[in-house]
Image (cartoon, rainbow, N blue to C red):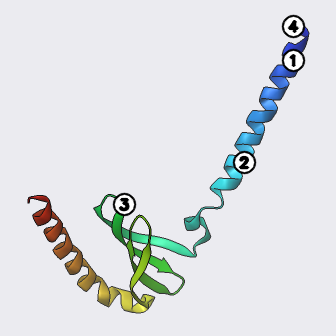
Amino acid sequence: MIEELPKIVLSLVFVLGVILLAARVMKGRGVEQSGVLKVLGYLSLGPRRGIAVIKAGGEVLLVGVTQNDLKLLKAFPEDAFEGELKTIKDNIQQIKGLKRMLANR
């Protein structure tokens, strides 16, 4: 038993090293790390439902998210986003109000 202890410790160190290496590699593969996609905002509308504003390349996408589906609600160029942002914020406030009203029923 004592003769096998160094083998066990060496094996444990090896396995931990592989796990740490895999974690480091996976951390570098995140979507936000690549700069291609960036979530600008998300509004939850219930369990597994919501609306996301996503920057993809030179476009800003308004996406409806459900448990089984993604739907593009609106897409516009990034430079037009600032002008549309106020309208989107107003719409989100209306949706929040409707959500509160429905929750009180």
Label 2 to label 1: alpha-carbon separation: 24 Å
Mark 1 Cα-neighbour bin, 10 Å: few <14, some 14–19, many ≥20: few
How far is the residue under mark 3 from the one under mark 4? 53 Å
Which amino acid type is shown beneath numbered disc 4? Ile
- CB-based contact (under 8 Å), mark 2 and mark 1: no
Secondary element at image label 1? helix
For the residues carrying marks 3 and 1, which lies nearer the camera in this image? 3
Residue at 38% x, 68% y: name it. Answer: 66
Left or right of 72, for residue 44 = left
Q: Quadrant of residue 80?
A: bottom left
Q: x, y (%) of residue 105?
A: 8, 60
User: SS class of the residue under badge 3?
Assistant: loop
Q: Position of residue 34 (x, y in %)?
A: 61, 70
Which residue is under mark 4? 2
Sequence-wise, the earlier of marks 2 and 3 is 2
What residue is rendered at 13% in x and 64% in y?
A: 102
Mark 2: secondary structure: helix
- Residue designated by label 3: 48
Residue topped by disc 2: 22
Q: Which residue is mark 1?
A: 6
First reached walking from the N terminus: tag 3 or tag 4: 4
The quarter of the image holding the N terminus is top right
Determine the residue positioned at 78% across, 27% down.
Answer: 12
Mark sitting earlier along the chain (4/2) = 4
Q: Earlier in the sequence, mark 3 or mark 1?
A: 1
Q: Is residue 25 left or right of residue 96?
A: right
Q: Residues within 10 Å of mark 4 (few under 14, many from 20)?
A: few
Mark 2–mark 3 distance (CA, rounded to whole Å) = 30 Å
- Amino acid carrying label 2: it is Ala
The kind of residue tagged 1 is Pro
- Secondary structure, mark 4, is helix
